[in-house]
Amino acid sequence: MSREGVYNFSAGPSMMPEEVLKKAQSEICDYRSSGMSVMEMSHRSAIFAEIFAQTKNKLKKALKVPDTHEILFLQGGATLQFASIPMNLMGTSADYAVTGNFSSLAAKEAEKYGRVNIACNSADRGHSYIPKQSELKLDAGASYFYYCSNNTIFGTEWQYRPETKGVPIVCDMSSDILSKPVNVADYALIYAGAQKNMAPAGLTVVIIDKAIAGRQMSVCPSVMSYDTLIKKDSMLNTPPCWCIYMLGLMLDWLESIGGVGQMEKIKSERAAKLYDFLDNSSLFIPHAEQGSRSDMNITFRTHSEELDALFVKEAASMGLLNLKGHRLTGGMRASLYNAMPMQGVDALIDFMKKFEVEHNAK
Ligand SMILES: *Cc1c(COP(=O)(O)O)cnc(C)c1O
């Protein structure tokens, strides 16, 4: 199999635009006549310092990050942030909205460091929905309110930003960052593992209001202290240099297609097409409830596990890859991140239509 005619629906690490990969390929052995690859450069060199500063600026511009906030490029994945956040910000208690696997894991991790108030838990309906603002049980004394804007595994996405009456908001945006504009000033901290919608695995982006740094627990490791990381401009130790460079290329590509404003239109259209097909299908059943659906990860199934498995297998033989749902949910999941072209969705729907005709006898 070659890349030609293949659409990769992986939930992460996920597909990147071919132009970005080609650009990286053209520079991989000799970055701009430096005589070396970005992978081989000192992170303290002038040439890498420029890549670092430019990537930061591009992200600042793409998301209109205000000067009150600092951008950090870190290692450890989103999962390390599950611990970093409470160690830095929790004080005595925090509110956690549990709407899927990753927010559940984050809440469990936070329990080691203080009191966790579960503001909501959508497990009662298989994490198929996002609770309404009026259903959130908020603690006015909480140090922060934590939520995950897009639930990668279950395929739900918050369609609103929770109102917390002044309690700082922390958000895991790993799987929908850069898919639409966000008002960064509304958040005390936004973070995202890069491998869903930004860059290769190994980079975690944190966007933090500088005013909330400096409250870390005394046992907080230096490499997890936001205060220290801000002061060191993400270079307390070696940052994920190659991934930072790749993020720069991804941001150039995003700008070339019109930025996050244009991406919001594209991703909405892309997802609407697939949901429309699912809603009218006599075979496929969408998982997420109307009004809570993710535009990034679309989860669905048929009436039988055997048929689901057959679907995934036959789809793969047609070049429609990685459609198997997460082990927690079963069924199927089509991840439609920024790099997925509309042709990929069209090819998927065409295949689903054929499969539906062949297997419709229930
Ligand atoms: C993938 C994912 C994570 C975990 O990311 P790692 O980088 O593997 O730690 C956390 N949150 C969300 C929303 C994700 O999609």
Image (cartoon, rainbow, N blue to C red):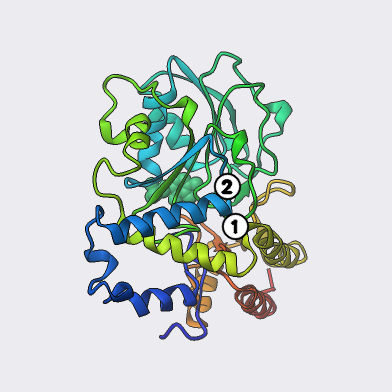
Quarter of the image containing the N terminus? bottom left
Please name whichever residue, 268 or 64, is drawn nearer the observer in this view of the structure.
64
Please name whichever residue, 39 or 313, is drawn nearer the observer in this view of the structure.
39
Residue 257 is labelled as none
**What residue lies at 43% left-to-right and 24% top-to-bottom?**
89
- Does mark 2 have its CB less than 8 Å from ligand 1? yes
Quarter of the image containing the C terminus? bottom right
Task: Kindly tell me whether residue 153 is visible in this rendering.
Answer: no
User: Is 90 left or right of 167, judged from the image as shown?
Assistant: left
Mark 1 residue element = loop
Which residue is labeled 1 in the image? 296
Quarter assignment of residue 228: top left
The image shows residue 225 at horizontal and vertical percentages of 33, 31
Please name whichever residue, 252 or 100, is drawn nearer the observer in this view of the structure.
252
- Does mark 1 have its CB less than 8 Å from ligand 1? no
Quarter assignment of residue 303: bottom right
The image shows residue 254 at horizontal and vertical percentages of 56, 65
Q: Earlier in the sequence, mark 2 or mark 1?
A: 2
Which residue is labeled 2 in the image? 150
